Amino acid sequence: MTNIAELLKGAAQSFPDEVVTQAHVRHLDLPSNGGRFALITLDNGFDHSKPTTFGPQSLANLDVAIDQVEAEAKAGEIVAVGLTGKPFIFAVGADLKGVEVLKDRADALAIGQAGHAVFRRLGDLGVPSFAYYNGAAMGGGVEVGLHCTYRTVSRATPAFSLPEVFLGLVPGWGGCVLLPNLIGPERAISVVIENSLNQNKQLKGPQVHELGIADALFEGADFLEQSLHWTSAVLRGELQVQRPEPDRGAAWDEAVRRGRESADAKVHGAAPAAYRALDIIAAAKDGDLGAGFAAEDEALADLIMGGELRSGIYAFNLVQKRAKRPAGAPDKSLARPVTKVGVVGAGLMASQLALLFARRLEVPVVLTDIDQERVDKGVGYVHEEIDKLLLKGRVNQDKANRLKALVTGSLDKAASFGDADFVIEAVFEEMGVKQKVFAEVEAVVPEHAILATNTSSLSVTEMASQLRHPERVVGFHFFNPVAVLPLLEIVRGEQTDDASLATAFGVAKKLKKTAVLVKDAPAFVVNRVLTRFLGEVLRSIDEGTPVDVADRALAPLGLPMSPIVLLELVGPAVAHHVAGTLNGAYPDRFGISENLGRIVAAGKRNLYVYDSGTPELDPEVAELFETGDTVLTEEQVRDRALDAIAQEIRLMLDEGVVAEAQDVDLCLITGAGWPFHLGGITPYLDREGVSERATGKRFLEPGVASVPA
């Protein structure tokens, strides 16, 4: 028996609300005379709304179950032990609600040591152990299975990952040590580092098997039955499990080196978790499990007590909890059904919207534009994208045919939109054009139809001001690429009524978007913050700071891309247009870069050339620049940009653009790729002292998303 109670005594006091996982032991006779078998099932007694987790008491329960089966194995009463989960869920790791409130490093260290002490017993039972990944498995749920002798996985498993680095931790219960020794360092780094830093990318069941994490793959319908047949065959010697031995020479070191390059590309050295994980993987080359587990314990304790974990959990809670209960959204019972959608415009953005509406709502979608060529091109784009989904196996032939049939085009708004419940415009970003479009649409749609605008910066209220029913106009601002970025800013105009707004939120939910209610204000949230930020960087360049210096200024934050690369992604013309809109509203804070204007006038889309592999300022762009002689350091540019962001967010909150600072954070995370490891823009500004320096006060209460007291 382990001293699990002693290890967890202090930590358990910090987990008063733990959702306790039970470890039920039952016995059965394996098929084909395979012998008597003990099966441990992890179950917290809830449906899918509360996935199985490991807190102190849950670990203790598993430890007791292992005591029982270990004694049975020693007595010769069983030939093997299996571990599985409740329907559709294996286990999703540590109970983060408790981890984030730990304040003593000794308790944090005990969590790591206790997990190792319990899990590694599964590999030391004296009889083989089998993990049956029957559903979602993450973090410690994956790791407990790695300690077993063999593993099977269900083809229906929807999510399998080691997400710790994404949250600011390392896989601390064996993942950094066991996984590279099982499947090799290159594949392990893909799972531990690359997938985590790629917005917590999840593996499916077949991928788990292909990587070599699981020894066998079975269909979900009879997964456990097939796993038990396979287990019996292995125990009877009919099946031999072959696993290639990892190359422990230079290839291991090269894999770690490439892993560091991958981490650098994502977080630029700003987040320690990825590098701690890589250090442990590098040391795991010698196969010393005890030393590796001890290193995981120390890293886990350090990171639990650091700010990165709090930041990661804060961000995680925003996208998992707050996003599902949008602040200020009307009662959903007011929402009207949407059985047909109209899209005005057939350009790239409009076509992306048409595809999304067809896939998620599965209702007819009609595109219109000013000529047949544009309409045909838009519909053709949607059909081509559906064909790509078919080739990737994302839809079957029948589904592809049905989706294509849903998306059509027409030049006749009256005929196309006469029975539409929801019409969204995605035309040129100019007020007069949009007002004209809405007037045409209002004349032909039913009385109940919602009129939505995908404007990125213009006033929804002004856009609706000339209509007979301005109360049904709502802002529906997507972010490009539509299929990738989750955020949808839902903008309430001054006369937008609750029914229209509720319908917009209902549609957003069906589209699987993160909807945030935004007041009608210039550029709303994301574009307003990013424009202020980019404006300060461009101003420093206009004044005389070299482009490369200004562009490196924000590197210590570990942002997904530098300011100039972001400008290229947005497009100089779009950035210049939004800056003009905000300059008209707030001329004291939003300037218009004359150099950017020259770039747009010259038709340049990129400031950099990449001929040498390293970005360099395009000589043609350099010739357009006219600058002053004020040269700032990287730190000065960074301070100027962060101060400006803090000021703008404070003003947005004072104006009531969103309900709380958390909504600004949610918008930046889901709409602009603000890194999880920073936790959100406002807690970062608080931790760095920028909020108080720039605005005189913090955005959040002390202790939120920060280092524990």
Image (spheres, rainbow, N blue to C red):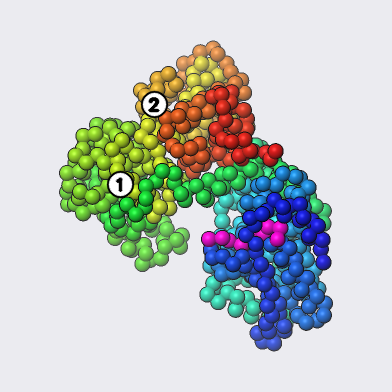
Q: Secondary structure at mark 2?
A: helix
The image shows residue 83 at horizontal and vertical percentages of 67, 70
> Residue flagged by tag 2: what amino acid is it?
Leu
> Residue flagged by tag 1: what amino acid is it?
Ser
Quadrant of residue 457 in the image?
top left
Residue at screen point 81% across, 57% down:
6
Which of these two is toward me, 657 or 675?
657
Q: Mark 2 highlights which residue? A: 582
The segment highlighted magenta reads 49-57
Residue 442 lies left or right of residue 665; in this view the side is left
The disc at residue 385 is: none
Residue 593: tell me if it is visible: no
Residue 118 lies left or right of residue 358; in this view the side is right
Residue 84: tell me if it is visible: yes
The disc at residue 500 is: 1
- In the rendered view, would you say 552 is above or below 259? above
Residue 404 lies left or right of residue 444; in this view the side is right
**Position of the C terminus by quadrant:** top right
The image shows residue 332 at horizontal and vertical percentages of 36, 52
Residue at screen point 44% across, 44% down:
327
**In magenta stretch: residue 55:** yes
- Residue furthest to the bottom: 33
The image shows residue 476 at horizontal and vertical percentages of 35, 43
